[in-house]
Amino acid sequence: MNILLKRVLDRLVRTGNLKVTGPKGSAVVFGDGSGEPVHMHIKTAHAERAITFDPMLAVPEAYMDGELDILEGGVLGVMRIAFQNMGSGGIDATWSKAIEGLRHAFRRLQQINTASRSRRNVQRHYDLSGDLYRLFLDEDMQYSCAYFEQPDMTLDEAQAAKKRHIAAKLRLKAGQTVLDIGSGWGGLGLYLAKAFDVDVQGVTLSTEQHGVATDRAHAQGLESRVHFELKDYRELNERFDRIVSVGMFEHVGVNHYRTFFDKSATLLKPDGVMLLHTIGRSGVPWATSAFIRKYIFPGGYIPSLSEVMPAIEKSGLVVTDVEILRLHYADTLKHWGVRFAANRDKAKAIYDERFCRMWEFYLASS
């Protein structure tokens, strides 16, 4: 292991039990020895150099490319050590913080999500094969945080509970019109129409999701009550009694928060109700993971409340309820990770080993 990387890891890893074997076979242990052991093998000098200068991006890239193997502890173990050392005088104390600070400073340039760019960004992720998502999602293909009313719930039960929870907050009445922004594979819209006798219009930028959702509506005989369109929300002009958006706001981009809420306000009827369900950041605004932004969600950004609330207030909308579902999302990711691992060979048959390694890191690091 080169001296510079050893110095970097000495500062990065203050707690935990991390063993790193370098390209020439020498091994060094970092941390205070606490917790489950994790063993990484950096196999090439190229990966060693990259990790030295930008560990937060280079580690997952080296893992994807087969230049780094995790011999003990798995990807989750690596992420556990990373999270343990953030803000503890470890990771934040190195120049990696300066690199992430630059990424944060330039985040607005990376999130100029015009209608055409938004469509391209969404299609890069959501137009992957539906067979891939069926390997780790629930039967209804809910690709967002579930709601675990009880800790022993299955993923399917928790996703059904999520839909009930959303519906209760929307205070639906029969005959109302509902707009679903980012309607995915259609599960939420179809549920609302069946359970509450409402008319639903869903919009998505994913061709794959639009096709699946439309087929599901026809198969369930709901095509007269639920209509899915391949359209940007900014193109809409109708008004609705209710608006719901689940797992879409992360793709809006910080530059467009005012546009999103201003448009939502014009689409919502007087006395209407809007529910926004998004991943959020606890604490101050900061850069979204470079790995996630580069390989998983291009143009994506995880907002802080301090960035969202001013845009809501300026639109004229009134916030009446905020609920934090942080632990529910951790449980959701755990279920997705277990399911993906159980079906890894099938995922590899659809794509390849590099893709599987990328997806493992995504599910573990989110």
Image: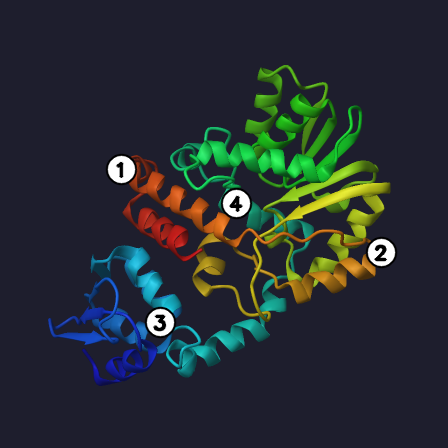
Callouts 3 and 1 close, C-beta under 8 Å: no
User: What residue is disc 4 on?
Assistant: 145
| Label 1, residues with CA under 10 Å away: few <14, some 14-19, many ≥20 | some
Residue 316, horizontal then vertical, whole percent: 85, 56
Residue 147, horizontal then vertical, whole percent: 53, 41
Q: Earlier in the sequence, mark 3 or mark 1?
A: 3
Q: Earlier in the sequence, mark 4 or mark 1?
A: 4
Q: Nearer the viewer, residue 5 or 192?
A: 192
Amino acid under disc 2: Gly
Q: CA distance from mark 4 to mark 3?
A: 28 Å
Picture disc at residue 77: none
Callouts 4 and 2 close, C-beta under 8 Å: no
Q: CA distance from mark 3 to mark 2?
A: 43 Å
Q: Earlier in the sequence, mark 4 or mark 2?
A: 4
Q: Please identify the quadrant where the C terminus is shown.
A: bottom left
Task: Report which quarter residue 275 is drawn in.
Answer: top right
User: What residue is disc 2 on?
Assistant: 316
Q: CA distance from mark 2 to mark 1?
A: 50 Å
Q: Nearer the viewer, residue 327 or 336?
A: 327
Residue 231, horizontal then vertical, whole percent: 69, 39
Amino acid under disc 1: Asp
Amino acid under disc 3: Pro
